Amino acid sequence: MNKRIAVITVICTLHIGLKASVPDRPIAGSGAALGQTGIAINSSWSSMQNPAMLPWQKHYWAGIHHENRYLTQELGLSSIGAIIPTNPGTFGISISHFGYNQFNTTRAGISYGMKFSEKFSAGVGLNFHHLQIAGDYSNKNAYTVEGGLFYSPIEKITLCAYIFNPNNTSFNEQESLPSALGFGLTYIPSKKILLVLQIDDDTENKPAIRGGVEYKALNNFSIRLGYSSGNPEGLTGGFGWFIKGIQADLSFGYHRVLGYTPQLSVSYQFGKKTD
């Protein structure tokens, strides 16, 4: 099977039903290069994946992201996100769009996280999903909830848990929004190195193991490598650059059949959290 046939097969599968393989929210920023991880990394983009990470973000923040999966226009995913610190918690807002004019999904979400101690936080989120299929198919809407937990037993270790759509909401019997459960671990052995491990289970596919390593080559420049056994499967890597509030993250994923998936995230951090 060559790449073109494989990609066409993927697109046709999307028309049959919305499954776990259809992304509607990006694993952006550093997580995309670190094996498609996201729920346990203390970063602004990761707080879009796990609302329990929100209260650890101390600045107002906004970001944009685009993913060109397998270098195929029909599998493009774009997203915007924002973080609004308040007292006592922090709000997160995200909107993402996947697909093309014949098949696309849109997801809009709002989440809130609050710190209960210097070692523990929790968060919840509400999402609106819209599915549009061309032709005689009618548009469909659905609502889902999500939640997360953060715990840091010692300064260098972070443990996180995440759950999505526990009540198994779906568009209908054919187009599903699978429930998902994830666990994440980060370990920072030194100021220059970060290790991350994550296990996901979306109830429709076998559990996925993801992980990666980040090396801070300079104070404002990082190199990342990772691997994901789940969708999207394969090797990942990338770079991160931060200067004067601007964060740029470039990442690449590689699938042995479908090829490369480039991703770019750009964000701006400004203002300070109100004490």
Image: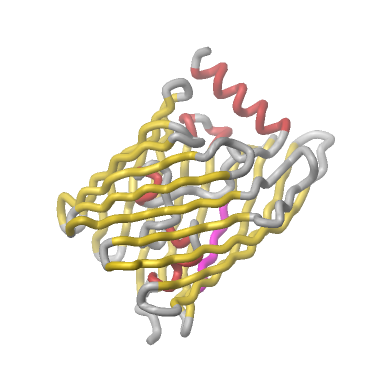
Residue placed at 57% from the left, 17% from the top? 5
Q: Between 183 and 83, which is closer to the camera in this rendering?
A: 183
Is 43 part of what is drawn in magenta? no
Residue placed at 65% from the left, 46% from the top? 178
Position of 222 with respect to 7 (left or right) is left
| Up-down relation of residue 150 to residue 275 (above or below) | above
Residue 109 in picture, x, y percent from top left: 60, 61
Residue placed at 35% from the left, 67% from the top? 152
What is the basis of the colouring in this image? secondary structure
Q: Which residues are magenta?
A: 91-96
Position of 253 with respect to 224 (left or right) is right
- Hey, which residue is sitting farthest right in the picture? 136
| Up-down relation of residue 200 to residue 108 (above or below) | above
Quarter of the figure with the C terminus: bottom left
Residue 9 in picture, x, y percent from top left: 61, 22
Is 93 part of what is drawn in magenta? yes
Residue placed at 57% from the left, 43% from the top? 23
Q: Between 71 and 218, which is closer to the camera in this rendering?
A: 218
Position of 228 with respect to 143 (left or right) is left
Total marks placed? 0
Residue 103 in picture, x, y percent from top left: 68, 37
Quarter of the image where one finds residue 156? bottom left
